[in-house]
Image (cartoon, rainbow, N blue to C red):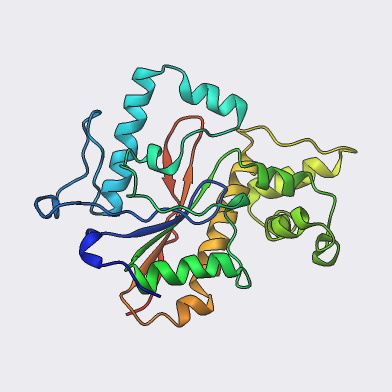
Amino acid sequence: MSHPDHTMFPYLYSLCLFYGLLFAHLISPGRCHEHRGKAASTGSDKLAEPTTVKDLLNSEKQFEKTLEKVEPGFFKHSAAAQHPSLSEGTLFHTAPGVVFAERNIAAQYYEDDKNGNAVLVYATAHLGVHNIIVMGHYGCGGVAAAVTSTVNSKQDASKDPIEAWIWPIRDIYLKSKRGEIVTLREKNKKLKTIAAPALNDTGYKALVEENVKANVQRIHKSKAAAGHKGRKAAIYGWVYDIATGDIKDLGVTVSFGK
């Protein structure tokens, strides 16, 4: 297999699990030499070229402000529909080719997922990725499905492909001792039919966050991470708020490699 010439890819690479989908950003900031080390663009008419993770967040912040000016009420409408319509490249205001994305339901990483592992290894071992961002979003349908599910064991979950996929989230929901999730679980025990939680339900939001944290740890403990002999890669856990356009860093950053 031939690999890309690294001179064609600038200086910071990041891989994300984006939204409630799977594996996402390969950030190629500073497309020509004079951009090296400069902050991300903040002008609404210029695409961002982030060179640090902080720059990436700053470019998203600027895009959030610009979008709300151009289309007032965008985030309110997005939250009401619970169908985030911004792609990762758009969200971070980056040019085509800057973002490398592979997606799945509810930001899940599995050791036996050949596709996910191929992306992880290719990005870190062959493209020089050194920032991995697991990124969930409030209002995630996969997380809501885990709440409304009636399946209570991994064995039963294995009988249905969707239940099997979201089982780790369901397991967190059933076992978590985090207060907001406990409250949601206890409230739902009293109901005959469990509806999807409201977007702003604190237990729902907490479950989105705990799911992201769990996937950060799964990547960190994976064989791919253990076998990585290249440059140290940091794994971040972020959550995108579809109601405000804000991104929350959960503060669970870990790393692997040299």
In the image: residue 182, left or right of residue 88: right
Residue sticking out furthest to the front: 2
What is the x, y in percent for residue 79?
A: 56, 28
Q: Is residue 233 above or below residue 246?
A: below
6 in relation to 221, above or below = above
The C terminus: image quadrant: bottom left
Q: Is residue 11 visible?
A: no
Q: Residue at x 51, y 69 (%)?
A: 118
Q: Quadrant of the N terminus?
A: bottom left
List x then y, in percent, for residue 111: 60, 72
Image coordinates of residue 120 in percent, x first then y, are 47, 67
Q: For the image shown, how many numbered marks are present on the structure?
A: 0
Is 204 on the left or on the right of 92, as rendered? Answer: right
Tell me, yes or no, if residue 180 can be seen here: yes
Snapshot quadrant of residue 100: bottom left
Splitting the image into 4 quarters, where does residue 228 fall? bottom left
Residue in the foreground of this view, choosing between 178 and 22 = 22
Q: Nearer the viewer, residue 143 or 7?
A: 7
The residue most toward the right is 192
Residue at the left extreme of this rendering: 34
Residue 217 x/y as whole percent:
53, 67
Instruction: Identify which residue, 166 or 159, lies in the foreground.
Output: 159
What residue is drawn where x is 60% and y is 24%? Answer: 80
Q: Is residue 13 above or below residue 19?
A: below
Q: For the point 20% across and 51% down, which residue is it? A: 31
29 lies left or right of 88: left
